[in-house]
Image (spheres, grey):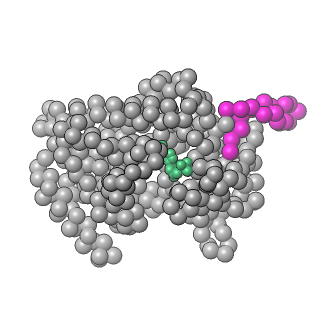
Amino acid sequence: DWIMGDYIAEAVAKIREQVGDEEVILGLSGGVDSSVAAALIHRAIGDQLTCVFVDHGLLRLNEGDMVMEMFAGKLHAKVIRVDASDLFLGKLAGVSEPEAKRKIIGGLFVDVFKAEAAKLKAGGAGHKGATFLAQGTIYPDVIESGGAKSKKAVTIKSHHNVGGLPEQLGLKLLEPLRELFKDEVRELGVALGLPHAMVYRHPFPGPGLGVRILGEVKKEYADLLRRADAIFIEELHNFTDAATGKTWYDLTSQAFTVFLPVKSVGVMGDGRTYDYVVALRAVQTSDFMTADWAELPYALLKKVSGRIINEVRGINRVTYDVSSKPPATIEWE
Ligand code: XMP
């Protein structure tokens, strides 16, 4: 609509004025905020923006390719994809404590991003070097970082909207979404041409599947989990609630699959199986501080469980998590 059109024109003019002919780096995660920030800044300054997308190997099925297809493919933005999965998995080997895993993932993420940013800052080959770091900080982040929060909340913020990073890198900060609430960021994303599915996606934690594989993270586990989770999410989109006309994906605030590194016995044909277990988690919440487990239809659960067990060799049992927050948390770690 024209109001959003006006907003975009104004925001674009502001970014152009602030940046001038300088160059900007942005850490793209595939999440809503960094995606919308990237699309807006790209609209304003085109090739003066370079996005850095660090793939830690703990993303969902095809997620990295989808991010590249959207930003490099469709928007023709400059995106550097850093495939750091071996590095992350290597450092995570043997580590099972949740906060230790978060620290490793968050720390490595910053290291890898910093190394890329330093290269871009140095410039070369027709580039004078970046002077701005763009972040998808939104208004609630601005308020949050002012007050004391739980340790986990601090970790959340320190992951992608990295505190202190611009200073450490000697870069100026560009935060075009600072005044917007989440709903407004989403509307802006749609108006900028980002797909609805990307802009209305459930939140995904910075440490990714790293905190959805209980205990030690292994590539084998991540690969199984990715396939099982993709089936769950696909069926949440496929099932519509008759009363509201909405899909179960839209009726839940967050839904995902958790990998349990335990084996249970099953039967398949004439044989016995001894394979892994996954838990499905789906919650409804307005603020993520408290949450109810979602009363998903049995038909949906049945479809998902049947598909996962038949299609993902290595998983022979699917459970549904019926715990609310508190006392349980939304994630299992
Ligand atoms: P919990 O499990 O604490 O999750 O009930 C509440 C919300 O926070 C997300 N979450 C995280 N997000 N880094 C993130 O970026 C993290 O380490 C992290 N831990 C939890 C979780 O997905 C849910 O939306």
Taking the image as shown, residue 304 lies to the left or right of residue 167, namely right
Tell me if residue 193 can be seen.
no
Magenta stretch contains residue 15: no
Magenta stretch contains residue 274: yes
Q: Is residue 316 above or below residue 190?
A: above
Taking the image as shown, residue 115 lies to the left or right of residue 64, namely left
Q: Is residue 112 above or below residue 19?
A: above
Taking the image as shown, residue 77 lies to the left or right of residue 123, namely right
Picture quadrant of residue 29: top left
Tell me if residue 278 can be seen.
yes
Exactly how many numbered labels are in the figure? 0
- Looking at this view, is 73 or 189 the one in front? 189
Picture quadrant of residue 273: top right
- Looking at this view, is 11 or 325 the one in front? 325
What residue is shown at x 11% (from left), y 49% (from top)? 21
Counting from the top left corner in percent of width and height, residue 198 is at: 45, 56
What residue is shown at x 57% (from left), y 41% (from top)? 333
Extreme residue in the right direction: 270
What residue is shown at x 55% (from left), y 39% (from top)? 211
- Looking at this view, is 75 or 202 the one in front? 202
Counting from the top left corner in percent of width and height, residue 319 is at: 73, 46
What residue is shown at x 46% (from left), y 48% (from top)? 150
Counting from the top left corner in percent of width and height, residue 223 is at: 58, 35
Picture quadrant of residue 292: bottom right
The magenta stretch spans which residues?
261-279
User: Which secondary structure type mostly characterizes the magenta part of the structure?
Assistant: strand
Extreme residue in the front direction: 148
**Location of the N terminus (image quadrant):** bottom left
Counting from the top left corner in percent of width and height, residue 317 is at: 75, 41
